[in-house]
Amino acid sequence: MTEMAHALRVQNLSKSFNDNSVLRGISLDVATHEVVCLIGASGSGKSTLLRCINLLEPVNAGRIWLGDEEITRAGIDEDRVRQRIGIVFQAFNLFPHMTVLRNITLGPREALGLSRSEADERARGLLERFGLSEKSDDYPDRLSGGQQQRVAIVRALAMDPELILLDEVTSALDPELIAEVLNLIRELAGRGMTMVIATHEMSFARDIADRVCFLDEGVIAEAGPPDQIFTAPSHPRTQRFLQRIIAAGRM
Amino acid sequence: MGDTKRSAGRGSRLLGNRAVLVSTTSTILFFIAVAVVVALAPGSDIVGERFLNWVHLKQSLLGTATAPSVAEAFLLNVRMFMIAEAIILVLALVIALVRGVPGPVFFPFRAVAVVYTDIFRGVPLILVLYMIGFGVPGLGLGYVSTRSDITYGIIALVLVYSAYVAEVYRAGIDSVHQSQTAAARSLGLSRWQSMRFVVLPQAVRRVIPPLLNDFIGLQKDTALVSVLGSIEAARAAQIYGAEQFNYSAYVVAALLFVLVTIPLARFTDHLIARDRRRREAGGAAPGALGTAAGAPHDVPGTIG
Amino acid sequence: MPRKLVAVLAALLVLAVACGEASDDSAGESGAQGGCELSDPPTLEGGTLTVATDRPAYPPWFEGSPKDYSGFEGDLAAAIAERMDLDIKWVVEPFNKSYAPGAKNYDFDINQISITPERAQAVDFSDGYFNNNQGFLAAEGSDIGGATSLGDLEGAQLGAQVGTTSLAFINERIQPESDPKVFDTTNDVKSALESGQIDALVTDVVTTVYLRDFEIKGTEVIGQYPTEEPFGMVFEKESPLVDCVNQVLEELKGDGTLDGLQEKWLQDYLGVPELSD
């Protein structure tokens, strides 16, 4: 019996691709308003975990609850679940044949059934709040990488999700454009958005996370508050990983 | 070509450029040479007389007492082409979509779509025309067997070309990166909504050149429907030619066919140019690393 | 660079002129007309008469194996070859190409081809060997079955082969309300009649009777209408052989052989009522 305080609960999740076992029994609870950062090397399973939560990938074993509802049960309406979870990808994936505004209103209008004016109003409000108003009638190819990624986040927000997943959203950006995106995320966190963020930006993670999970070869090797993980990690693998990060000058 | 730099500053940039002068002159000289070779060839007089005779060009275009007007007959080609094209655009899309519907329940439909495409891309149009145009009426099935030969002709054209165009659509749909579908489904859009709002608009824009190719082929293949009896432009030209032994009528018919394809070709050029800039956006903007639409370590997978 | 270019173009020009000159010589050969030696006829292949017709070749015009046709036209061609002391060799030529201008790769074509002034400008004809009439074939019990004049056919959907005098006849003499349907071959016109796409098929009367009796069940020949266009054999323009063949044809007419062939092969096919105007 789970309380509503849990926005997301993952229990013993396993996922393999053919013979390759990527997730080996992941368990994770995310409370409402909590910000959880996932760190770890490439291939450790961060993206896969997020894609499983979002039901983009079918799971091999384990269960997931979104709020009160078990979303891994048979017969679940996956489309409805995905409306409640927002996800932003490393490659923005904006729809190139639509304006920024239309990118944002597509979900609310078609999936949520909002009217055109309702959806437009919501979209414009969000664009205004995050300083992107003057781009609303532009096509994605006229925006910088940072702007596109911010639009992608706004697009996810427009669905009014219970939970937002961010999958390495700054990894494909030039350094000078990363800050604007991180600031937006910071603001969302400040407003109480429940988030699970996979990231390589360690300083940012340290700054914003309520909890940090270190993924290594498909399991959560260590989890805890950022101070603990970044200054006094207990697990040898965590230590090695952080040493490499520091040596590379990324923290 | 060090000269180009020197002459760049003087007078008109184009004419002052020696390279351009040389290439233009040699192109003109080449065509003059071709013209001379053709003119000196034995039989060139009679070829001109037989194929490019002004009186016959005019007469066949407008028709005589006994030979139908090629221009008027061409209207039949246009009519067939427009009706067929409208139907094909829709039917081919349905076939392409049916081929892609996942799930064991839909296996029979997918199988039918595959068999349909294989058969009608494999059988020559002329055979399909014979089978439908002569075969169906011969079955004596009441209403179905008493349609006009133009109707059967259009049916044959639709059957054959829908198979080709369905494959073109399929290629277009496949070329839209999977991450677009992922993004759309992640918003909570259904499979059909993703297809309709995100994938298809991009897919169709990408395949405009091959679609145009197929439709130009269709425009010309309307001439084959003449085997079923009606007089379209190529047949009208043939009748004139058989009567007058002058084949300028064929040149007239050919010109009419070409004239009709040109606006279509220019229009699609315009569509392509207009859409070019939008084709690669979405992930490859200034300041972005990595590939256009897919993150380097996006894990491949399936979406139900 | 420009100098090399000029050299190449000059070479092209010289080539073009040279080719033009060379092939002019061969054009001078076939000028001779009139005066054909029966003992040494100028056939394509020495000792052989190459004769063309279409495929399929319909009875009663042609019967038997394509290597060695009998039938009215088959026997006629064989008789001509025999009188000229030549072997006979059969080749195939589609009807539509037979009366078109240009060089032929046979000595003559015999295929129910009517002699018309227009065609005579493009090819040479022998003298006529059969007086053809247009025939009309319709489904039994059709609306036009009782037609007694050309006028009665005005409302019908007629069909004919492209380039035939039958098609011209429809357009000039009958002038029906709806355009006739035009087909590539007689076979296709036949299929159209069988499937009900046309009301009546127009071709030479002998063929219509043959179709009624042997090919399409449930049809009737409505009637025939005489034309001024007898059948002739088709030769390449200015062929020196025409004269010889005409001489032989004269003989065959004179000694009753031609009549005999007509009696043997075509008698059953001529008893068809005539339509009035």
Image (tube, helix red, strand yellow):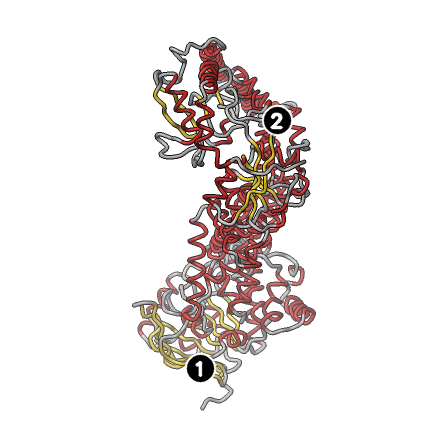
Whole-percent x, y for residue C137 in the image: 56, 42
In the image, what residue type sits under mark 2?
Leu
Is residue C64 something that shows in the picture? Answer: yes
Whole-percent x, y for residue A163 in the image: 52, 76
> Which label sits on residue B14?
2
Residue at horizontal 37%, vertical 35%? C64
Residue at horizontal 67%, vertical 31%? B64
Tell me the quarter of the image containing the C terminus of chain C: top right
Q: Secondary structure at mark 1?
A: strand
In the image, what residue type sits under mark 1?
Arg
Disc 1 crowd rating (10 Å Cα; few below 14, some 14-19, many 20+) is many
Q: Image quadrant of residue C36?
A: top left
Residue A86 placement, left or right of A118: left
Callout count = 2
The one of A137 and B102 positioned closer to us in this rendering: B102
Residue C224 placement, left or right of B295: right
Whole-percent x, y for residue B266 in the image: 61, 41
> Which label sits on residue A9?
1
- Is B43 above or below relative to C138? above
Q: Image quadrant of residue C226?
A: top right
Whole-percent x, y for residue A185 in the image: 54, 70
Q: CA distance from mark 1 to mark 2?
A: 71 Å
- Is B159 above or below relative to A75? above
Q: Chain of mark 1?
A: A
Residue C133 placement, left or right of C8: right
- Is B119 above or below relative to B15? below
Is residue B207 something that shows in the picture? Answer: no
